[in-house]
Each structure stands twice: as C-alpha cells, then as structure tokens.
C-alpha cells in the first residue's frame, strides 16, 4: 500500500531539485487517516462501533503548455494562467471493519480540462472538463464519469455546468447535475479564491438530494494558503453537513505540503436495523499531501 513512504520519497525528490517557478508537470502523493463512528440511541441495547481507514495515493498532471506562475499565488497558478491539463491518479486503501478483519479498496482516476485560448478566436475562454473514476471497494466496482462545459467569464472567474453519472456493478445508476463558480480576488499581497457549488442528484426510490457548497482559500503572499469549506446535502428530509479546513505551504516555488482536516455529520436517522431508536453517524479525516512541480 502507498502510505507515508510515498510522501517521504516525494519530499526527498523535491528538496534535491533545482528551483524553477514555471512548470509543465506536477506530481503529488498523499496519505489520509479516517474514522467512522456509529451509535444507536434510545434502544434497549445501545451500541457504539468505530471503523478506521488508511488511504495512500499518487497523482500526476501534465499541462499542455508551460504554466506561468507570475500571475498570483503559486497554489492558483494553473487557474490564473487558464491552463489545460490531463491528470491520472491511483489510491489504495484499507478499512478496519468493526466486525473484525480488513477490507481493501483501490481507486483509479482520470481528470482533464481543455481551455480554448487564442487572439480573435470566438471560442476563446470556453472550457471543457472530462472526468472518470473507478472505485473498487472489496468485490464491488463503481464507475463515475462525466463532463463539464464552462467559460472564463473574466480572467479570474469561471462558471462550469457539470454532469456526472455513477454506475454500480450490482445494479443502479445515479445521475447528477451541478453548477460550479470560482473567482479569484487579487490583493496587493496574496488574494482570496472563492468558490460555490450547487447541484441535484437523481436516485431511484428517494427524493432527489440537493447539495450546495461554499468555501474559499485566503492567500498570504504567494506561498501560504488557508482554506475552509462548508457543504450541506438534503437527503430525504435529513441534512448531511460537512466541513473542511486546510493549510498549504510552498516551501520552494516547486515544492508544497498540505495538511487538512474534515468532518461529515448527518442528522440522526431512524435505525435501519429496526430497533426503533436513532442512528448517529460521524466521520472525520486527517490528511497530508505533498506536490512537486517541474
């Protein structure tokens, strides 16, 4: 499994390289430790369970043209330069089951964006996103794929309409549509990247869940970024709230580390086991990642 050793290898590679601001490639490695806690309440036999997970991953991005890093914070270089790219990723995880034993899972991903650029070109500023992801938890296979079409409304603003489809090998398709808005506010020393998302998912047998997210990253100069996001999903009358915070530091112009923490806390629901009580679920995750550009 890819775990902390992948990050250590990435750090060694980055610190041994010669710094150069502009880049064409980006390599990343990460490790996450998560925990799911469940508790049945108001029953004759209340129970608590906990399952821990370890996930490690690698990711590589190729940019169709050299990315100019002179336009703002290093963390937003690709966005501000209207960069087109292709990203491939792989992660490997293990869950310690409450019932005993472990379950392994892998994820493969492809993500790309093409931005039309050119003086006098009528399509200049328009963009297309293509995404694909395969999840293999245990003996299941889940495919997610989709696309987005959008535009740079200003040099620092994008609006993208998205469509996603999820297919599970044992039956069931899920369709979702959404709108994503991003804007970078430039300051004399750093800036603020604001983001907002909203969408609806079509799930058979359920009221169509709606999800919205707001967040942003505050940049102190070009090397430090501090982010926060809040997300809410309305699922059959229950709210599922999630939030995340992170700190990113470009130690050099080519090498950065990121530390993040996130939580997901749904409303208490009726116990699916039919005990007549309530089921409380909480999920939290701590993650560390590193990236190197060249």
Image (cartoon, rainbow, N blue to C red):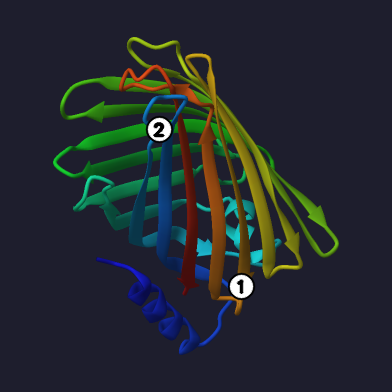
Report helix, strand or loop for mark 2.
loop
- Percent from the top left, x then y, of residue 166? 31, 28
Q: Is residue 142 among what the camera can see?
A: yes
| Dot 2 crowding, Cα within 10 Å, few <14, some 14–19, many 20+ | few
Q: Is residue 156 visible to the viewer in this orientation of the structure? A: no
Q: Would residue 96 appear left or right of 209 to someone viewing this image? A: left
**Label for residue 213?**
none
Q: Quadrant of residue 212?
A: top right
Residue at position x 47%, y 14% in the image: 236
Q: Residue 119, how many percent across, how many down?
A: 61, 45
User: Quarter of the image containing the N terminus?
Assistant: bottom left
Residue 240: image location, x then y, percent: 53, 29
Label 1 – label 2 distance at C-alpha: 47 Å
Query: Is 224 on the left-hand or right-hand side of 176?
Result: right
Vertical comparison of 181 with 117: above or below: above
The quarter of the displayed image where residue 167 is located: top left
Is label 1 in a helix, a strand or a loop?
Answer: strand
Residue 159 drawn above or below residue 245: above
> Outermost residue toward the right?
188
Nearer-the-camera pick, 38 or 256: 38
Q: Earlier in the sequence, mark 1 or mark 2?
A: 2
Give 14 or 287, whichever is nearer the viewer: 287
Q: Residue at (48%, 72%) from the top-left corner?
A: 293
- Residue 168 horizontal/vertical position (percent): 22, 29
Disc 1: which residue = 250
**Mark 2 and mark 1 in contact (Cβ < 8 Å)?**
no
Q: Is residue 89 left or right of residue 262?
A: left
Q: Residue at x 14, y 41 (%)?
A: 139
Q: Which mark is residue 46?
A: 2
């Amino acid at each position: 499994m890819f775990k902390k050793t992948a990050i250590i290898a990435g750090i060694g590679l980055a610190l041994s390289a010669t710094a150069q601001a502009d880049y064409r490639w980006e390599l990343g490695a990460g490790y996450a430790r998560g925990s799911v806690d469940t508790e049945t309440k108001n029953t004759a036999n209340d129970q608590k369970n906990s399952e821990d997970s370890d996930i490690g991953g690698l990711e590589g991005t190729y940019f169709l043209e050299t990315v100019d890093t002179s336009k703002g914070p290093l963390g937003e270089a690709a966005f501000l330069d209207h960069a087109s790219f292709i990203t491939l990723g792989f992660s490997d995880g293990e869950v310690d089951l409450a019932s005993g034993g472990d379950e392994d899972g892998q994820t493969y991903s492809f993500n790309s964006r093409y931005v039309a650029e050119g003086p006098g070109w009528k399509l200049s500023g328009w963009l297309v996103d293509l995404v694909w992801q395969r999840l293999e938890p245990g003996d299941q296979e889940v495919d997610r794929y989709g696309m987005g079409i959008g535009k740079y409304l200003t040099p620092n603003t994008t609006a993208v309409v998205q469509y996603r489809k999820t297919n599970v090998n044992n039956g069931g398709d899920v369709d979702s549509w959404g709108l994503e808005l991003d804007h970078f506010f430039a300051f004399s020393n750093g800036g603020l990247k604001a983001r907002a998302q909203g969408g609806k998912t079509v799930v058979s047998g359920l009221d169509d869940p709606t999800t919205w997210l707001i967040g942003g990253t505050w940049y102190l100069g070009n090397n430090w970024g501090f982010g926060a996001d809040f997300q809410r999903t309305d699922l059959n009358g229950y709210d599922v709230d999630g939030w995340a915070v992170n700190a990113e530091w470009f130690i050099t112009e080519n090498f950065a580390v990121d530390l993040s923490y996130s939580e997901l806390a749904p409303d208490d629901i009726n116990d699916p086991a039919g005990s007549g009580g309530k089921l409380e679920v909480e999920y939290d995750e701590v993650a560390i990642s590193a990236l190197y550009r060249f």
